[in-house]
């Protein structure tokens, strides 16, 4: 079980809750907004989505590498939610616009990883 925290000190910290240990601390260079783990059992990367104004930056939190940048919003991102079942991410900005994108390609996909058509 992991927990992540951000602060105005421009840092992202990942904690192993069970072992009461800090796994990593990343200096981001910006004050992060919201964060969300993106975890798939068959993926070797350990991803976390971090909002920076209207952008969402995807990091591998074990290596601190930037994997991708999602630029689908026109205003500040206020919420990010991940669905492991459909391998999709929903993000919402402060104007109420909801965006839907794949956690595999980091782009809009009309079908989920399960093959279900989510929009008809």
Image (tube, rainbow, N blue to C red):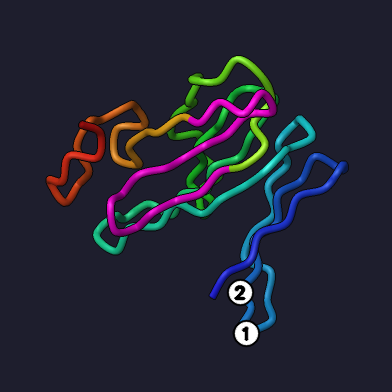
Q: Position of residue 77 (x, y in %)?
A: 64, 31
**Percent x, y of residue 72:** 49, 20
Quadrant for the N terminus in the image: bottom right
Front residue of 35/88: it is: 88
Q: Is residue 56 above or below residue 21?
A: above
User: From the viewer's perspective, is 77 left or right of 101?
Assistant: right
Q: Residue at x 75, y 31 (%)?
A: 29
Q: In the rendered view, does 78 fall on the left or right side of 69? A: right
Q: Which residue is mark 2?
A: 16
Q: Which residue is mark 1?
A: 19
Numbered-mark total: 2
* Disc 2: CA contacts within 10 A as few (<14), some (14-19) or many (>=20): some
Q: In the rendered view of the protein, which quadrant contains the C terminus? A: top left
Q: Which residues are magenta?
A: 80-98
Residue 13 in the image: above or below residue 89: below
**97 falls in the magenta region:** yes
């Amino acid at each position: 079980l992991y927990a992540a925290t951000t602060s105005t000190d421009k840092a992202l910290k990942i904690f192993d809750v069970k072992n009461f240990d800090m796994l990593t601390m990343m200096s981001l260079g910006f004050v992060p907004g919201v964060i969300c783990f993106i975890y798939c059992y068959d993926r070797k990367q350990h991803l976390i989505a971090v909002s920076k104004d209207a952008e969402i930056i995807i990091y591998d939190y074990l290596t601190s590498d930037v994997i991708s940048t999602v630029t689908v919003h026109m205003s500040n991102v206020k919420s990010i939610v991940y669905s492991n079942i459909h391998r999709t991410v929903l993000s919402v900005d402060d104007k109420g616009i909801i965006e839907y994108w794949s956690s595999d390609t980091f782009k809009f996909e009309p079908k989920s990883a399960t093959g279900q058509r989510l929009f008809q």
